[in-house]
Amino acid sequence: MAHNTHRDMKVYGGIKLYAGTGSAELAQKISDYVKEPLCGRDIIQFPNENLFVKLHSSVRGQDVYLIQTTSSPVHRNLMELLILLQTLKLDSAARVTAVIPYYAYGRSDKKDQPRVPITARLIADMIEVAGAERYMLIDPHAGQVQGFFSIPGDVLTGFHIISEYLRTLRSKMKDPVVVTVDLGFAKKGRNLAATIDAPIAFIEKRRVANDAKAQALTIIGEVNNRDVILVDDEIDTGGSISQAVDLVKEHGARNVYVVCVHAIFSSNAVDRITAMPVTEFVTTDTVPIPPEKLILLKDRLTILSIAPLIGEVILRAHEGRSVGEMFNE
């Protein structure tokens, strides 16, 4: 009996950190926190756009964490993630965890009209088939993404880090109020408001057609003569947040602070955002922002690192300790 028990136990070796090209800077910060170096790997793109991956050393029996966002270029980053996962699995890693700071296709989480896919589920299936045995996500757009995985994982939020920063700003604000960009974000917005001891208001909007455009309608709550903290999980083209800023200003808001976890800033979003009457933009480094876009935002952009959050979860997962204890859960 003792022999069988020993045979069935899965024992992990040391922590091994790998990163794709999509999260190089964030991965280095996580490496510094965990005090484990990033392991070497080659990622080569051939002239036919096919990718080739080779690890510099063996991961046999090791506890491996692969850090790779799936933001732009989405399909290059996604294929890197999948190929690296399979490479690690085929090299006999004891456990492979996919650490995905930004989860692509998160909005395609349900069949909300006939003859459409549930792509967020497809991505989860591909990650599992490629070899991931665990996953870590930061603020996926839809909470039900967790249900698309049949492997265990940790779904974390960057708002713990953001709320700590906002508490340092609160003394400079006049009667701050947290405003969610839409009703779908009401629960997270309420949690953030409670954390910084501020009231909450909501913007009601209606999305039309399939072109990602939305019409902001009205504000539920009071913003007149108050400093407003506009919150959303991500800023993509900047259309929704631009409407929200205009709306709160029309209703008498004083200074406006825009907060999000994922700064996608696609298309001409930065040009649109730069023109907004916003005092400060606060985001995290789940998505790398190109230098040419950072220059346009100048000193109005504050980027908070989620590396300590991910690094601590990696250490706890490796040692078999509770992650919930970090948040008093």
Image: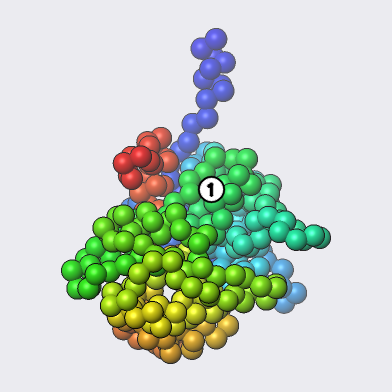
Query: In the image, residue 267 lies at what x, y percent?
Result: 58, 83
Q: Quadrant of residue 296?
A: bottom left
Which residue ends up furthest to the right in the rendered image?
115
Residue that appears at 53% across and 48% down: 135
Q: Does residue 97 lie above or below 41 as drawn?
A: above
Q: Secondary structure at mark 1?
A: strand
Looking at the rendered structure, the kind of residue marked 1 is Tyr
Could you tell me residue 115's position as x and y percent? 81, 60
Q: Give the percent coordinates (x, y) of residue 136.
A: 50, 50
Q: Nearer the viewer, residue 109 or 196?
A: 196
The quadrant in which residue 209 appears is bottom right
Residue at 52% in and 30% down? 10
Q: Quadrant of the C terminus?
A: top left
Q: Which residue is mark 1?
A: 135
Q: Is residue 230 visible?
A: yes
The furthest residue to the top? 1
- Residue 312 placed where, x, y %? 35, 49
